[in-house]
Amino acid sequence: MARNAKRRLGGVAAAITVTALLGGCVATGGGASGITQDDTAPLVIQSRFTDDAKGGLPALIDAYQAQGGGEVTLNSTPSESYRSQLPTFLTAQTPPDVYTWFAGQATRSFADEDLLLDLSDIWSEDLGNYSEAQRKLSQNAAGKEVFIPTNYYWIAVYYRVSEFERLGVTPPETWQEFKEVSEKIKSQGVTPITIGLGDNAWLAAGWFDYLNLRINGSQFHLDLLEGKESFEDPRVVKVFETWKEILPYFDPSALGVPFQQSTTDFAQGKAAMTLIGAWFQGSVPDDVKGDLGFFRFPIIDPSVEIAEEGPTDGFFVSANSTHQKAAKDFMRYLASPEGAKVFMAAQGDTSLSANPDVKVELSPLAQQGKDLLESADSLTQFYNRDAGDELQPAADAALTRFLAEPDKLAEILADWQAASVQARKSL
Amino acid sequence: MTSLALKARRRRVGSPPPIVLILVLVPLLIEGFGVIWPAIQGIGLSFLRWNGYSEAIPVGPQNYIDLWSDKVFLGAFRNTAIWTLLFGVLSFLGGLLMALALQSERRGVGLYRTALFLPIVFSLVVTALTWSAFFQPHGVFDGLLDFVGLGDLKRVWLGDPSTALYAVIVAALWRQIGYVMVLFIAGLKAIDPSILEAARVDGANSWQRFWSVTFPQLRNVNLVIVSTLVIDSLRSFDVVYAMTKGGPFHSTELLSTYMFTTAITSRQLGYGSAIAVIIFLLALGVIVSYLIRALSEERES
């Protein structure tokens, strides 16, 4: 009896312990100085890819060793727990050496705590051919490169070519055309826009990002996401006022539809369009893959420069790594045309190599994605990558609430601003 | 029995044999290392502003002060209260009713008991996934409503902030009622049948027999069940997180899920720890009042 109650208490205590344990020792990450180097033990790579041949890493490691690289150990953790463990890894006494991660703010927040190894020598010696945008994405606040990008992908409005033909519509280019197309689709009993917010609320941020980019441009967007502007700014209000024009075209049950169901609706022609990253191509059934098409998020204000989201993935090295020589050696191989080619072969045709000299046969869709990004005036990443992961929950709450209660916009924006300020306090 | 046990214990207080010391100290050490020490650290963390990798800044009680102006926290507090009340009361009543209905040994009663107890063998996450599919748009539940002609009631059960919390409570109840039922059956079996027989001979009707004889006899079981239920509701996390992650827009946020989101997803370890401390204090309040009541009743008898 009492034992039972005690076990329950133990449960509560254990829940608290999780938080406590994560902060096991309240020590701050120190600099890289005086790390004893050890050239014998294997290089440890920590990866967040657990499926699809672990994101191409096993093939890459094999190729690396075949051309004379040293021993490598690969640890893979599912991305959600990887995310929460990353600070613990990086502040550990003997951390893993090499990590998969996102470019931009997501990496910068670690770099600015001196947790990442300076890789500027690799950049100046080997990466001269990479684009200036990628170099900037790989820098810490002081302008030192701490990240090696491997690949990036595009985000666009996907549709089924045969469905668009059946519905008698063509891919729109402007906001007006987009509304007309949506109206025409809706009049035929098909949901114009599907989005699986039931279990993936973050997908709504894609819509916010693009509307803000098309209306206010990338500079304001990035300033807003970095906390330099307020969500209560009239320019943000304008974004939502524009969004309201297309709310009737969203699946009315979007908030309760899981991503899987949304994908099924799309594949079965019950819903016509979805704004999503290129990885979506891997989520649809095989017989639909060949029928996929996408178009650029429609232009709203022609006077605003065209910005696209091109989320970039890559690798960094812990500043406390005890295998810095091997780690840099691996990073050089990763960025080389040969290494990049091996890595890209496992990515399918849903992302593009960051190395401009990698010549791979691109599928028509991948070529279209490449053209889309290359024709853009500027590139952003995605909400959580530009703002920092910590800011995503506040955005999720605000955007899903807007979809359900668009009339409460003022309150929603005030809450969003307050929640973002709170989330930024720990940064 | 208690007085005997007490006497026996008193006799040995002078010189505990080494085996007793070991049996007490080893678990205490494990408990201290695994639970008590991290819990104390958690309390310490709640006075910091820290993201897990940068310099931790001591902020005094600021995290606690911030909590009271945080709308999400207040909403989570309110939801936890609703959850505790509904989940607690309904599983108590449901479990009691089921136990009364299924206590006597009739043919086929084992089948019903098993059916009610079965949900307990599924992990909460599996339960949550099943119920998510049940409630999803065009799912089984909407189909049922259509079938009985109540199609007008259809809504996005888990995506509508006015229904989501209750939909999740239904899923949690489905699992909890069987558990409470088993506890009650055990309690009912312990009642001496001759007392009930005596009441029947005295002419008590079935409601009188239940209210004046059976229910008072269940007092000890009730205490266990009530405290178990309160603590279960305070630590409810998995079923909510798996079904809605606290959404849509915090409408199913409980203290436990909000603690997780702030500490783990938003990396506000100090702020999340402050929420954890509040949960701990609430749980502690329940345990202490339970112990005080249980002990004083024992003394009375």
Image: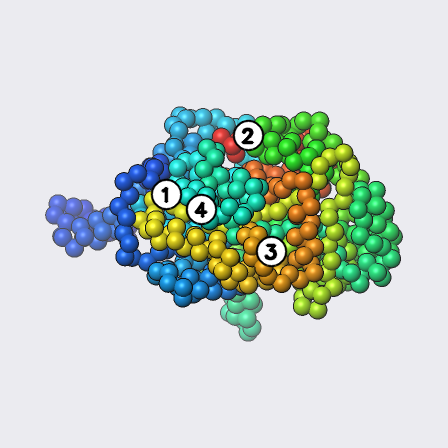
Point out residue A279 in the picture as x, y percentages from the top left corner. Answer: 62, 56
**What separation in Å lies between label 2 and label 1 (alpha carbons)?**
29 Å
Q: Which residue is mark 4?
A: A125
**What separation in Å lies between label 1 and label 4 (alpha carbons)?**
20 Å
Is any atom of residue B86 visible in this view?
Answer: no
Q: Which residue is mark 2?
A: A421
Point out residue B152 in the picture as x, y percentages from the top left corner. Answer: 80, 52
Q: Which residue is mark 3?
A: A351
- Label 4: state its secondary structure: helix
Amino acid at dot 1: Ala
- Numbered badge on residue A319: 1
Is any atom of residue A360 visible in this view?
Answer: yes
Q: Looking at this view, is B274 or B109 the one in front?
A: B274
Nearer mark to the viewer, of 4 and 2: 4
Q: Are marks 2 and 1 in contact (CB under 8 Å)?
A: no
Nearer mark to the viewer, of 2 and 3: 3
Q: Looking at this view, is A324 or B155 the one in front?
A: A324
